[in-house]
Amino acid sequence: MMKVAASLTVTGLLGFLLLEALKIVLAPVAAWLLGVVALALKLVLVALGLGLGIVILALSIWAYRRFLRSTRTVEAE
């Protein structure tokens, strides 16, 4: 019975030490991962903003040319 109790105590102690070591190691890893996610989100939002700007610019150029074409046909008649 004492061998079982001794092994449980040793594994409990090793588990506790492992948990404390993981707490020390995982805090910087979590901060780094949060920074990577924030950077990726920022890049995605900038790309979406640029894409939206290009689409708005293209639509405005198309609308301007269409407006000029429709006024020229009215003047020609």
Image (cartoon, grey):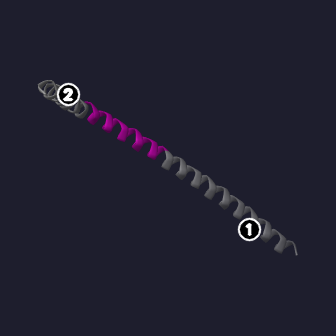
Q: Amino acid at mark 2?
A: Thr
Q: Is residue 27 above or below residue 64?
A: above
Of 40 and 51, the residue lying toward us: 40
Density class for disc 1 (Cα within 10 Å; few <14, some 14-19, many ≥20) is few
The verdict on residue 49 being magenta is no
The percent coordinates of residue 76 (x first, y second) are 87, 72
Quarter location, residue 27: top left
> Which residue is the site of mark 2?
11
Left/right placement of residue 66 relative to residue 38 reads right
Label 2: which secondary element: helix
Of 74 and 36, the residue lying toward us: 36
Q: Is residue 12 above or below residue 38?
A: above
Q: Amino acid at mark 1?
A: Phe
Left/right placement of residue 57 relative to residue 14 reads right
The percent coordinates of residue 71 (x first, y second) are 78, 71
What span is colored magenta in the figure? Answer: 25-43
Quarter location, residue 21: top left
> Which residue is the site of mark 1?
67
In the rendered structure, which disc, 2 or 1, sits on the residue that comes first in sequence?
2
The percent coordinates of residue 42 (x first, y second) are 45, 46
Q: Nearer the viewer, mark 2 or mark 1?
A: 2
Of 75 and 9, the residue lying toward us: 9
